[in-house]
Amino acid sequence: MKKYLLLMLCLVILFNGCDKNEEEPQAPDISVFDLSQETQWDYWVVGRNGDNFFVNVLNNKPTSVYYTPNPNEEGYSVFFDQNGYPNKLIINDYIFLFANFSGTKVDAALISPDGTINIARDVETDINWNEDFLKSASAEPSDWLRWTGHALGAAACTAGILAGPATFGLSWVVTGIGCGATAVSILTEFLPEDYEVLGLTASTIGPIATAVGCVNDLGVSCALGTASTAFSLMSLNEEKIEESYDDVQVADAALEYGYGDVQVTLTWDNTADLDLHVFDPNGDEIYWNDKYSSSNGVLDVDDIDGKGPENIYWPPYEAPGGNYQVYVHMYPWNDSDYQYVTGNSYYPSSSNYSVLVTAFGETKKFTGSISFDETVHITDFDQNGLKSAQIREHKITITHKK
């Protein structure tokens, strides 16, 4: 009997305060302004609680978005590819890259301000990229605005998941703006079907004044100033991406091409022909003239006319244990042969390279310079990860390409 009474008491406590007649939460007010004639932005979405989304659109798909929960707080920028998928997000000098959207999952890379790169595969998001994206094909602003909200929230959610363990606390920055949070839901759940796109005039400044603290007599100029500030901050974020070009280039390539327990990706900075060579534990050499090994290693992309990438990998669970060795070689073209094969008239005498190595759960970037016909030993690793002591046992194969 005591157990029964205790159970009933727990149920009363659990459901205390629940009322079937309780009113549903009211959707936040939202206003959409056409800024295309006044600023570098196409649209500005303003929420009652102060959320601001500045959106640029091309062919009914977003190209860039700047979001801030408050005009007095730094926000973040999201850049989209030509299909309308988010491919870059930058917040607080941290750059996130996205690729391989499939179902509710996406692959992502995090580039920290110190140049450290972390890659995560099959990150679960709260959006079905295959189904929800189809809605953005409509020319109706409500459709692509909702898509923008979904994509923005999912990108921020993925960034929070990836940033948490890698940056010891950056995830708090994106907490509340992703994973179905209210700030994004104003574009996804609460955008009315019959909403009106407003012009930026004194008579329509009310919602903006509430959101950004503009006084009525200066409302329009204040709103334009806020839009200009947002565009300047997004431009600064674009510059940060450009400043990290080498890191973005190699991380993008690693995301795009084959991967597994072992993946080695090479990129460089000019029109030289750099070749990636990896020896597996059996001593087999994988490179441009021998792209497959008996241990299931594969060179799936080979570039001869500049900047890469080159990528060698073993599929998941197929990389054997033992010692691997990574080398980069600058192929010694002469100018006439190089022009005949590639169409380029000049072959550089040196290059700067980046090599991203993922080895059994550990990822590390190697950078350096290489000269004409030089071979550089990058690193060794085994099933226990990258080694501090490098072992030089192999000499790479030099084969003429013409």
Image (cartoon, grey):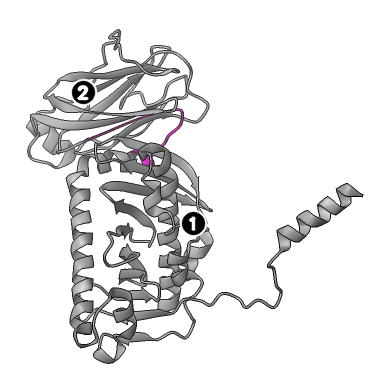
Residue 379 figure quarter: top left
Upstream in sequence: badge 2 or badge 1: 1
- The amino acid type, in three-letter code, at marker 1 is Cys
Q: Residue furthest top?
A: 393
Q: Is residue 99 visible?
A: no
Q: Residue furthest right?
A: 1
What is the span of residues highlighted in magenta in the rendered image? Answer: 254-267
Image x and y of residue 351, in percent: 13, 31
Judge whether residue 259 is colored magenta. Answer: yes
Position of 196 relative to 390 (above/below): below
Q: Which mark is on residue 329? A: 2
Q: Secondary structure at mark 2?
A: strand
Q: Nearer the viewer, mark 2 or mark 1?
A: 1
Q: Secondary structure at mark 1?
A: loop
The answer to the question of whether label 2 and label 1 lie on touching residues, with beta carbons closer than 8 A, is no
Q: Is residue 131 left or right of residue 143?
A: right
Disc 1 target residue: 179
Distance Cα–Cα, label 2 vs label 1: 45 Å
- The amino acid type, in three-letter code, at marker 2 is His
